[in-house]
Amino acid sequence: MSERARVIFWRLAILAALLGSWEWLTGIKAISKTPGLYWLDPFFVSRPSVIARRFAYLASDEVRLTIWAMALSTVQSTLWGFVVGVSTGFAAGLVLGRNDRLARVFEPYIVAFNSLPRIALVPLITMIFGFGLLAKVVLAWTIVFFIVFFNTFQGARSVDPDLIHSARFLGASERQIMRTVVVPSALAWTFASLTPSISFALIGVVVGEFLGGESGGGLGYLIIQSLGTLNAADMMVALVALGVIGIVMALGIKQVEQRLLRWRPEYRKGA
């Protein structure tokens, strides 16, 4: 058995053990003489079998807003916020990382804005942009931008000066130095921030969907609706769907990273 097969086997084994324990502990009484008392109360955490049935129901045409439509809304908002945040954060990090004067000028503003709790910005953002797609994208952007910016900024400043001097000695222009030396060096730092960035973008979108209600759609709406009706099964469906979405997005970023950073030793070794 290959190493990859062993890893997959143990992942599936752990998942099966967790689901089996969850199903079993929510089905037996903690104290047999006390009615309604379980080791894991299904009222709060539901049961895997019930969650599976609710997922099938929410995925069917029997509901007006299916789980697929809600997941698509959440993914769309997350990707837009992620792309805009990464592109603007990377550009700003490169510019300020290579210009000390600009960095000193904008430093207090960047620190001040980054210090604001993002949850405190939700009412302001929804008041300005409403409850639709744009508000969720802006909220995700406010999170992703600074994660990517600080990593790119540090990466641009950490470029080996000898590489830059060597490039200039060989006749490279400032644009060529930026493209062939600074950007590849900063990319390694930037990609280190992309996996947490996509996760935080997803969190920001879901928080925005909490306030948006059905007009905003998304899995955040399903969570809030489940809370209002005390429906743990539907809430767990939304949480499981968010977890799967996060895994798929992180794997996608890993594939892009391996392609763009194939010059790094760890990826050459993997190839």
Image (tube, rainbow, N blue to C red):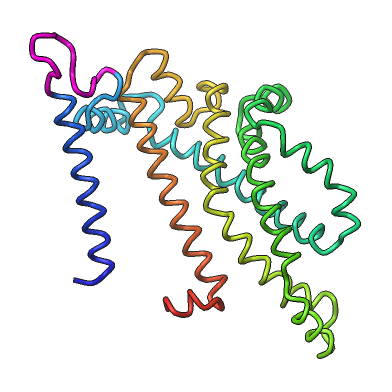
Residue 271 among those drawn in magenta = no
Q: In which quarter of the image is the N terminus?
A: bottom left
- Which residue is outermost to the top? 34
Q: Position of residue 63 (x, y in %)?
A: 34, 24
- Which residue is outermost to the left? 32
Q: Quadrant of residue 239?
A: top left
Q: Position of residue 22 (x, y in %)?
A: 21, 33
Residue 136 drawn above or below residue 12: above
The magenta-colored residue range is 28-43
Residue at x 66% of width, y 52% of height:
148
Q: Position of residue 251 (x, y in %)?
A: 43, 57
Residue at x 24% of width, y 46% of height:
15
Residue 32 among those drawn in magenta = yes
Residue 117 drawn above or below residue 13: above
Residue 119 drawn above or below residue 266: above
In the figure, is residue 49 to the left or right of 271? Answer: left
Q: Quadrant of residue 140?
A: top right
Q: Position of residue 85 (x, y in %)?
A: 66, 48
Counting the numbered discs, the total is 0
- Which residue is outermost to the bottom? 170
Q: In which quarter of the image is residue 60?
A: top left
In the figure, is residue 157 to the left or right of 61? Answer: right
In the figure, is residue 66 to the left or right of 73? Answer: left
Secondary structure of the magenta portion, mostly?
A: loop
Residue at x 33% of width, y 31% of height:
237
